[in-house]
Amino acid sequence: MSDIIISPSILSADFANLEDEIKSVTMSGAKWIHIDVMDGHFVPNITIGAPVVKSLRKITKEILDVHLMIDNPEKYIPDFIQAGSDIITFHLEAARAKTCACIDLIKEAGLRAGISIKPKTPAKEIIPYIDKVDMVLIMTVEPGFSGQIFMPKCAQKITEIKKWAPDNLIIQVDGGINDKTAKICKDLGANCFVCGNYVFKSENRKQVIKRLLSV
Ligand code: DX5
Ligand code: ZN
């Protein structure tokens, strides 16, 4: 249908039934599962850690797309590699001088590496790393919570990233994504959509994912 990737965020799923929740979206056409890791320091919320990723690894073969919203990512990346992640994305704002070290840790383990920027971080700060990573994640809300409103200004960064990006770079957007905001981002050049509430809180997940795949 298209080369669009949908990565439903389990932050909006029923945590008491994660296996069923994941099956419901993978059987509806999602090939990735987005796992939001928050530490209560880098963002004002605490979610889940590597042991949960390890358990999820046993119940799905789909891509585990781990989004680290934590300080000192270099300290914890090895745990998330061990746990069976497929893609690990960390925040530039949290890694700073250790950015290359974080990318190396992930790549040397044979995983795909992603780098993310918050709404207030200019796109040009990604330039030094753009040839080293597999994915750039542009936050379209302040990281920390699901169910927030999409910030159109952040989506403009996609155009800038596109100018510098190698052809195979995945451009992911995360925060307030629905079929309308996904279309805006797709037209600007994004090809991977993280969706929390829009998918998990919908009455017909299959239809919603189908709609997203064809924006
Ligand atoms: C926010 C997280 C997102 C969040 C998206 O900090 O990174 O992945 O779960 O949720 P929605 O799609 O509801 O904005
Ligand atoms: Zn996320």
Image: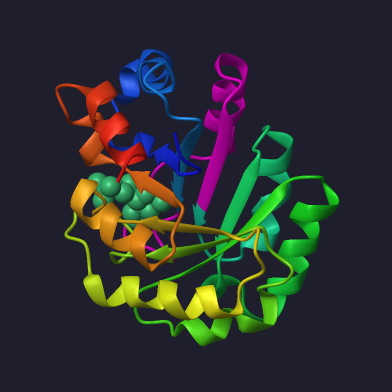
Outermost front residue:
1
Can residue 113 be seen?
A: yes
Image quarter in which the N terminus is found: top left
Scheme of image coloration: rainbow
Image position of 90 (left or right of 187):
right
**Magenta stretch: residue 33 in it?**
no
Residue 37: give x, y in percent of width and height: 47, 47
**Magenta stretch: residue 65 in it?**
yes
Image position of 24 (left or right of 126):
left
Residue 172: give x, y in percent of width and height: 46, 56
Can residue 147 be seen?
A: no
Q: Residue at x 68, y 63 (%)?
A: 133
The part of the image, by quadrant, that contains residue 15 is top left
* Depth check, front residue: 99 or 172: 172
Image position of 110 (left or right of 5):
right
Outermost right residue:
108
Residue 13: give x, y in percent of width and height: 30, 29
* Depth check, front residue: 20 or 160: 160
9 vs 161: above or below:
above
135 vs 27: above or below:
below
Provide the residue span drawn in magenta: 39-67
The part of the image, by quadrant, that contains residue 22 is top left
* Depth check, front residue: 6 or 119: 6
